[in-house]
Image: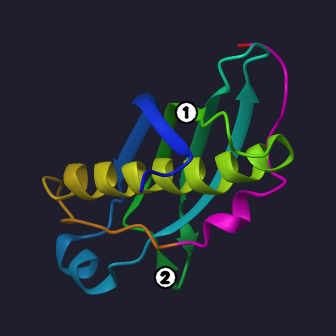
Amino acid sequence: MLSPLQIRRHWLGEVQLKPADNPIEEALRLRSISCRGVLAARFREDDTRRWLLKLSVELLPGEESAPSLYTGFIEMLGDFQVHADYPEEKRADLVKVGGGGILYSCIREWVSLVTARSVHGPVELPTLDPRSFLGDGEEGGKK
């Protein structure tokens, strides 16, 4: 059975990723990463039931005792559509939780792939509960 939420396409927006200046030996011991995500959701005001999501994840410097291996900013956008039979009053939550989780997974994969070829080696962003996206960002407006 298909999900009532379907992704039509997704793409990278803004990207910045910088390895820390730690010596390689120290970096191989640390494997630390700290991040924060913000989700913005906008729906199209017509009968297409389409939503545009933008998830921004910031890789933070961490603390002095556990500095991050990478700092930067990754923005992923996605075009989603909700099935016509899905209750209208539940659509925003479905899009934020499902769509936010999909985009975060895309960002995690991208960071892992890019850092695998970087000086400090691959880093996996921490997993998160996609329900944390409820209530964040904007809702409404036209694309």
In the figure, is residue 56 to the left or right of 29? Answer: right
Q: Which of 21 and 100 is in front in this view?
A: 100
Magenta-drawn stretch contains 98: no
Q: What element carries label 1?
A: strand
Compare marks 1 and 2 and give the one earlier in the sequence.
2
Residue at 22% across, 49% down: 114
For the residues labelled 1 and 2, the Cα–Cα distance comes to 37 Å
Query: Which quarter of the picture shows residue 82?
Result: top right
Q: What element carries label 2?
A: strand
Q: How crowded is mark 1: few (under 14 residues within 10 Å), some or many (20 or more)?
A: many
Image position, residue 97 (x, y; %): 65, 57
Residue at 55% across, 78% down: 64
Residue at 61% across, 35% down: 54
- Tell me the tag on residue 80: 1
Q: Which amino acid does label 2 sit on?
A: Ala
In the figure, is residue 130 to the left or right of 40? Answer: left
Using the image, determine if residue 102 lies above or below residue 129. Answer: above
In the figure, is residue 120 to the left or right of 7? Answer: left
- Tell me the tag on residue 66: 2
Residue at 36% across, 66% down: 69
Using the image, determine if residue 14 lies above or below residue 23. Answer: above
Magenta-drawn stretch contains 134: yes
Magenta stretch: dominant secondary structure: loop
Residue numbers of the magenta segment: 128-142
Image position, residue 46 (x, y; %): 76, 13
Q: Nearer the viewer, residue 33 or 67?
A: 33
Single out the residue that lies furthest toward the left. 117
Image position, residue 128 (x, y; %): 56, 72
Q: Which of marks 1 and 2 is in front?
A: 1
Using the image, determine if residue 30 lies above or below residue 13. Answer: below
Q: Which amino acid does label 1 sit on?
A: Phe
